[in-house]
């Protein structure tokens, strides 16, 4: 899992795999999951991270929570 933070955009992108992008699904206005051709999550885009992050319905949420907390990003329960 690799997390890239774009401070100007107030967004993070979480790389879950190196598989090529096939399609994406918006969970809401601030969260999107990218999928590979086999329907497996390959990445997660989250915007407005300075306000905190909602991990509901995100893949690998336990590991993601640990990584975000280590970067002092607020997590919503």
Image (tube, rainbow, N blue to C red):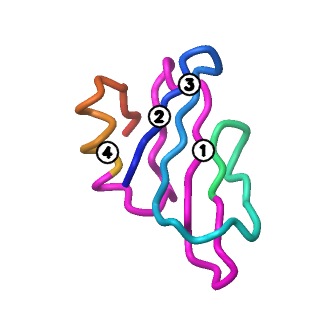
What is the spatial separation of the Cα atoms under label 2 and label 4, in whole angstroms? 9 Å
Using the image, tell me which numbered label, if any, was put on residue 53: 2
SS for dot 1: strand
Span highlighted in magenta in the image:
34-63
Q: Position of residue 49 (x, y in %)?
A: 51, 26
Mark 4 or 1, nearer chain start:
1
Name the residue furthest top: 8
Task: Check disc 4 and report the residue beneath it.
Answer: 65
Q: Is residue 20 above or below residue 5?
A: below
Q: Quadrant of residue 73?
A: top left
Label 3 environment density (alpha carbons within 10 Å; few <14, some 14–19, many ≥20): few
Marks 1 and 2: in contact by CB < 8 Å? no
Residue 67 vs residue 17, the one in the foreground: 17
Q: CA distance from mark 2 to mark 3?
A: 15 Å
**Quadrant showing the C terminus:** top left
Label 4: which secondary element: helix
Residue 32 within the segment the image draws in magenta: no
Q: Would residue 33 be found to the left or right of residue 70 on screen?
A: right
Above/below status of 29 relative to 73: below
Q: Is residue 57 magenta?
A: yes
Q: Which mark is residue 6?
A: 3
The Cα atoms of the two marked residues, 4 and 3, are separated by 18 Å
**N-term-proximal mark, 2 vs 1:** 1
Q: Which residue is mark 1?
A: 45
Residue at 63% across / 44% down in the picture? 31
Q: Marks 4 and 1: CB-CB under 8 Å?
A: no
Which comes sooner in the sequence, label 2 or label 4?
2
Q: Position of residue 5 (x, y in %)?
A: 49, 29
Q: Position of residue 51 (x, y in %)?
A: 50, 19
Q: Residue at x 58, y 21 (%)?
A: 10
Which-is-in-front pick, marks 3 and 1? 3
Residue depicted at 49% across the width and 57% down the height? 58
């Amino acid at each position: 899992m690799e997390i890239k933070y774009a401070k100007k955009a107030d967004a993070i992108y979480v790389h879950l795999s190196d598989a090529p992008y096939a399609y994406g699904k918006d969970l809401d206005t601030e969260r999107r999951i990218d999928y590979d051709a086999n329907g497996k999550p390959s990445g997660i885009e989250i915007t407005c991270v300075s306000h905190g992050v909602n991990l509901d319905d995100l893949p690998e949420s336990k590991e993601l929570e640990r990584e975000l907390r280590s970067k002092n990003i607020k997590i919503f329960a």
